[in-house]
C-alpha cells in the first residue's frame, strides 16, 4: 500500500509521476500544486478513476510557512509516507516569467527550485527517519527522489544553461549529501531528465524542436511518462539497494550533435 507525495503534480512531469506511483489501487497520493488548482484536480481525477485515493495540498515553495505546512499536512493525511518526490520547479521559459531579466529568473529559480526544495527535504528527511525508527525497520526504507537536469553537471551554452545549470547541479549535489545523511533509514536518488516535452516543449518549433530530437540517441523528445517510470523504479522495493545515485533519462545524450 504505497503512499506517495509528489510536489508540482499539477502538470507535466509531476503529474505523470503522481499518476504512475498511484497505480496500486490501495495507494494514497498527495498531489501538491502552487497555483494551478484545475491542473491538480485533473491529476487527482485520473488517479481516482483508476481506484487510487488522492489529497490535494497547495503550497508555494518560496514561502517558509508554506513549506512546513506542506510537510505537516502530507504526514497528517497519509500517516506513513513511502515515497516523496521533489519535482516542483519554476517555469521561467513560458508565461509571464519568460519576460523577466536573467537575474530575476536566476534568483527566483534559486529561491524555489533550490532553497525551497532543500528546506522542504530537510524537514521531510527528519520526519522519514522518525517514521522509520518508529516502525523498527519492519518495512522497507522510504525513499526520496529529486529531479535534476542531465546537462547541469557539464553545462550548456546560453542563458538557459547558465541559470538552470547551476541551480539543478546544486539540487543534485544536495541530493547526494542527503543520501549520505539519511542512510540507512531513507534512500535518496535523483532522476536527471533530458529534453522532456512539457509546456515549453509544446511551444517550440524549428531549431529547439530539432535540437531536442537530435541530442537524444533515441531521436525523439522525452515524455513525462519516461521520467515517471524511472521514479517508479527508484521508489520501489526493486531498488532497495540503490541510494545516492543519479539516473539520466534523456534517450542517451548524442555526443556527435553539432550546434
Ligand atoms: N521539461 C523538461 O525538459 C525538464 C528537464 C529537466 C528538468 N526538468 C525539471 O522537472 C520538473 C518539472 O518540470 P515540468 O516541465 O513538468 O514543469 P511544469 O509543467 O511547469 O510543472 C512545474 C510544477 O512546479 C510547480 N511550481 C512552480 N513554482 C512553484 C512554487 N513556487 N512553489 C511550489 N510549486 C511550484 C508548478 O505548480 P503550479 O503550476 O500549480 O503553480 C507545477 O506543478 C522541474 O523541476 C523542472 O525544472 C524539466
Image: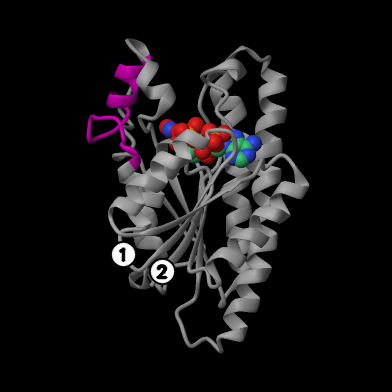
Residue 71, horizontal then vertical, whole percent: 65, 59
Q: Nearer the viewer, residue 90 or 259?
A: 90
* CA neighbours of label 2 inside 10 A, class few (<14), some (14 to 19), many (20+): many
Q: Which mark is residue 86?
A: none
Q: Residue at x 48, y 88 (%)?
A: 138
Tell me if residue 110 comes above or below residue 6 in the rendering. above
Q: Nearer the viewer, residue 64 or 186?
A: 64
Give the residues in magenta. 208-224
Residue 128, horizontal then vertical, whole percent: 60, 71
Residue 174, horizontal then vertical, whole percent: 63, 53
Q: Residue at x 65, y 77 (%)?
A: 130
Q: Residue at x 48, y 69 (%)?
A: 82
Can residue 248 be seen in this snapshot?
no
In the picture, the quarter occupied by the C terminus is top left
Q: Residue at x 39, y 36 (%)?
A: 194
Can residue 245 be seen in this snapshot?
yes
- CB contact under 8 Å: marks 1 and 2: yes
Q: Secondary structure at mark 1?
A: loop
Residue at label 2?
2
Amino acid at each position: 500500500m504505497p503512499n506517495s507525495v509528489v510536489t508540482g503534480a499539477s502538470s507535466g512531469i509531476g503529474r505523470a509521476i503522481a499518476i504512475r506511483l498511484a497505480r496500486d489501487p490501495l495507494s494514497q497520493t498527495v498531489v501538491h500544486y502552487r497555483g494551478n488548482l484545475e491542473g491538480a484536480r485533473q491529476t487527482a481525477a485520473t488517479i481516482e478513476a483508476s481506484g487510487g485515493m488522492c489529497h490535494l495540498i497547495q503550497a508555494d515553495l518560496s514561502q517558509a510557512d508554506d513549506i512546513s505546512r506542506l510537510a505537516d499536512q502530507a504526514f497528517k493525511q497519509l500517516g506513513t509516507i513511502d515515497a516523496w518526490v521533489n519535482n516542483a520547479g519554476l517555469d521561467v521559459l513560458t508565461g509571464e516569467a519568460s519576460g523577466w531579466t536573467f537575474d530575476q529568473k536566476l534568483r527566483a529559480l534559486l529561491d524555489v527550485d533550490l532553497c525551497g526544495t532543500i528546506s522542504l527535504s530537510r524537514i521531510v528527511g527528519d520526519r522519514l527517519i522518525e517514521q522509520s525508527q518508529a516502525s523498527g525497520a519492519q518495512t522497507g526504507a522510504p525513499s526520496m527522489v529529486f529531479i535534476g537536469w542531465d546537462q547541469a553537471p557539464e553545462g550548456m551554452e546560453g542563458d538557459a544553461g547558465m541559470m538552470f545549470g547551476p541551480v539543478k547541479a546544486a539540487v543534485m549535489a544536495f541530493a547526494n549529501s542527503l543520501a549520505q545523511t539519511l542512510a540507512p533509514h531513507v534512500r535518496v536518488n535523483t532522476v536527471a531528465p533530458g529534453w522532456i516535452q512539457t509546456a515549453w516543449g509544446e511551444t517550440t518549433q524549428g531549431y529547439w524542436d530539432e535540437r531536442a530530437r537530435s541530442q537524444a540517441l533515441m531521436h525523439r523528445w522525452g515524455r513525462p511518462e519516461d521520467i515517471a517510470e524511472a521514479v517508479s523504479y527508484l521508489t520501489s522495493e526493486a531498488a532497495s539497494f540503490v541510494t545516492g545515485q543519479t539516473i539520466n533519462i534523456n534517450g542517451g545524450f548524442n555526443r556527435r550533435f553539432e550546434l
